[in-house]
Image (cartoon, rainbow, N blue to C red):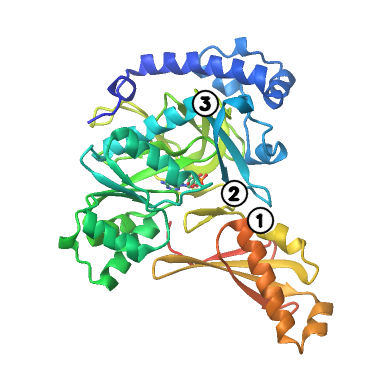
Amino acid sequence: MYWNPNKECMSRDEMSALQGKRLHKIVKYVYHNVPFYRNKLQEMDLTPDDILTIEDIVKLPFTTKQDLRDNYPFGLQAAPQSEIIRIHASSGTTGNPTIVGYTRKDIGVWSECMARALTAYGVVRDDIFSVSYGYGLFTGGLGAHNGVEMVGAAVVPASTGNTEKHAKLIRDLGISGIACTPSYALYLAETMEQLGITRDQIRLRVGAFGAEPWTANMRREIEERLGLKGYNLYGLSEIMGPSVSYECQLQNGSHVNEDHFFPEIIDPVTLAPLPAGQSGELVFTTLTKEGMPLLRYRTRDLCSLMPGVCDCGRTSVRMTPITGRSDDMLIIRGINVFPSQVESVVLDMKEIAPRYLLVVDRVNNLDTLQVQVELRQEYFTATFDTPAAIDELSRRLALKLRSVLNIGVKVVLKAPNTIERSQGKSAHVIDNRNIQ
Ligand code: DLL
């Protein structure tokens, strides 16, 4: 079943023609509305009339998260503020988040892309569908929510937290679909087992899992424990949110909504475009976005593209699962964390030396983050006998980290010179999870 067969099953020639037309239009739009892009194009001696077909895309400059940071908060917004009806935010590389504004049309496109994903998963109007991505600045909750409403299934905006109540609702309401991170799905399965809720008491049959990498083993385990079929859902806030790509029933790669988001794979070092099938860094150009259109945005996600028609009938290009990142971003409980965010907090506190270590683990299917920092010698000597001062500092640091990272962390204050120095390149992260 398709949500929009006209777009999902277009011939390659038709799709390329549509993409070329849309690319020209979006380049013209940003040229006239975003000084950042106008300057970049002028520096490269380009005008919108140099970009007429989709093949011309390789002439365009890349956009990076650093560009978003340099233009915080609204510098890359193309639409006037009066047209923006929603603002989301995701983690920036330091203190400031990345801000993304959407026009009414953007929200409509996003809902349709999400509806395409849900329809590919087999969700129908009769379903009761629980959205257990976080609602709020994160795009997961509201993004999935709009799609479920568009399909016409009944949405249960469960969000995250209060897992026991959610588990009971799944049983009592006969909830048949769920959208959440794969690690939350496992945590939910565990909570159900603790509550004595068995598989034959629940009706879950579809799971829309994403926002973090997950393995084939995790898929098997979730499917087995929750009795559903789990589908991949991929996306990123800068481009839209969930539903940039989605798996169909055949689960052989995720179909990109390429009439809206044009994918390329580049070599992350040379930045040269790579031929189809080769693995590299995924880059997206938004072809229809009004609020914050982006040209050749470097996602830092590593994967490859799979051209060719899928047996499901969809002609859209597919991407393989994400195998890693070309930067040091971590995803902890579905939330993106950059070590540099921790660094910016640590550098701000006079009691602490500029040295830190992040230890990530997965305990009972829940990610944990421990931040180890070293006290400065003077502070260590002065507070050696006053545990209350140490406690206060530890609480203050945990609060600060929480407000910058949006997740709770366990702070470990260490004596000077006790965090191990690595040889050569400083290693700030120990990730004990086994998710690749
Ligand atoms: O995670 C949007 C989303 C919400 C996608 C709900 C799917 C479901 P961000 O917070 O901006 O947006 O994080 C985007 O998360 O660049 C990937 O590194 C990672 N990611 C997202 N989906 C997947 C997935 C949302 N299915 C970043 N598999 C991306 C692997 C994923 N990684």
Looking at marks 2 and 3 on the same chain, the residue that comes earlier in the sequence is marked by 2
Asked if the residue at label 2 sits under 8 Å from ligand 1, the reply is yes
Q: How many neighbours does mark 1 have within 10 angstroms: few (below 14), some (14-19), or many (20 or more)?
A: some
Specify the quadrant that holds the N terminus.
Answer: top left
**For residue 149, what is the image quadrant?**
top left
Query: Residue 331: percent from the left, percent from the top?
Result: 51, 55
Which callout, 1 or 3, points at the residue further toward the start of the chain?
3
Query: Which element is circle 3 on?
Result: loop
Question: Label 2, on which residue?
Answer: 91
Q: Residue furthest top?
A: 49
Q: Amino acid at mark 1?
A: Gln
Q: Where is mark 3, residue-wise?
A: 289
Residue most toward the left?
200
- For the point 41% across and 53% down, the residue is 159
- Whether pointer 2 and pointer 1 mark residues with C-beta atoms closer than 8 Å, the reply is yes
x and y percentages locating residue 53 in the rendered image: 51, 14
User: Viewer-nearest of labels 1 and 3?
Assistant: 3
Sequence-wise, which precedes: disc 2 or disc 1? Answer: 2
Q: Amino acid at mark 3?
A: Lys
In the structure shown, which secondary structural element does the residue marked by tag 2 occupy?
loop
Q: Is residue 408 above or below residue 97?
A: below
Q: CA distance from mark 2 to mark 1?
A: 9 Å
